[in-house]
Image (cartoon, rainbow, N blue to C red):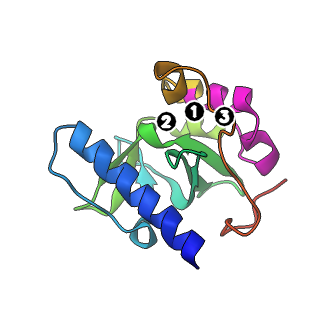
Amino acid sequence: MNKIMVIMAMIMIGLSVSAAMAGSNFTTFEVSNLLGTRVRNPAGDRLGTITDFVIDSTGRVVFGILARDFLSEYIAVPFSALSLKPEENVFVLNTTLDELKSAPAFSKKAAVDNRWTEDVYRYFGQQPYWTEEGPIPSEIPVIQEGYKTFPFPE
């Protein structure tokens, strides 16, 4: 239970730091309130629901895991590509339905492959944060048994 609380605290800190860096007020969000949040694109199309978050070995949120409404797959969306609109209880992802249908499917095996992680960031038009800050951490992202909340494919 303590490990889960630490992970939740790290995600809340990451969200708060992101909001502060964006020039907005310092705000925190409980992870339990973010899980299940709907994801829409700017046109208002429903894309899916956030089912989980993936963090790296430094505690930074790498991905939000999106369950697609129209397929039985999960996709990893770079956390930096998601904009939270708390007043609407929705994340906004700047993509189309067709682009999302072509997005790489998420799996535990793929997620520990640094090349795949970089490719996903670039697919969504995001600069991988570790390329901005120097060499890639040795463990991007951390996915361990016991921390998952959904039965992701191998």
Kindly identify the amino acid type of the residue bearing the numbered disc 1.
Glu
Span of residues in magenta: 104-121
Q: Which residue is mark 2?
A: 96
Q: Looking at this view, name the residue that lies furthest to the right.
A: 154
Q: Mark 1 falls on what kind of element?
A: helix
Query: Horizontal and vertical percent for residue 120?
Result: 62, 31
Q: Are marks 3 and 1 in contact (CB under 8 Å)?
A: yes
Residue 127 visible in image: yes
Above or below — where is 93 with respect to 121? below
The 10 Å Cα crowd at callout 2, few under 14, some 14 to 19, many 20 or more, is some
Calculate the distance from the C-alpha at mark 3 to the C-alpha at mark 2.
10 Å
Picture residue at 54% right of the left edge, 44% below the top: 58
Nearest the viewer among 81 and 1 is 1
Q: Mark 2 falls on what kind of element?
A: loop
Q: Are marks 2 and 1 in contact (CB under 8 Å)?
A: yes
Q: Which residue is mark 1?
A: 99
Residue 37 visible in image: no
The 10 Å Cα crowd at callout 3, few under 14, some 14 to 19, many 20 or more, is few
Q: Check if residue 12 falls in the magenta segment.
A: no
Calculate the distance from the C-alpha at mark 2 to the C-alpha at mark 1.
5 Å
Q: Which residue is mark 3?
A: 102
Query: Horizontal and vertical percent for residue 135?
Result: 59, 21
The 10 Å Cα crowd at callout 1, few under 14, some 14 to 19, many 20 or more, is few
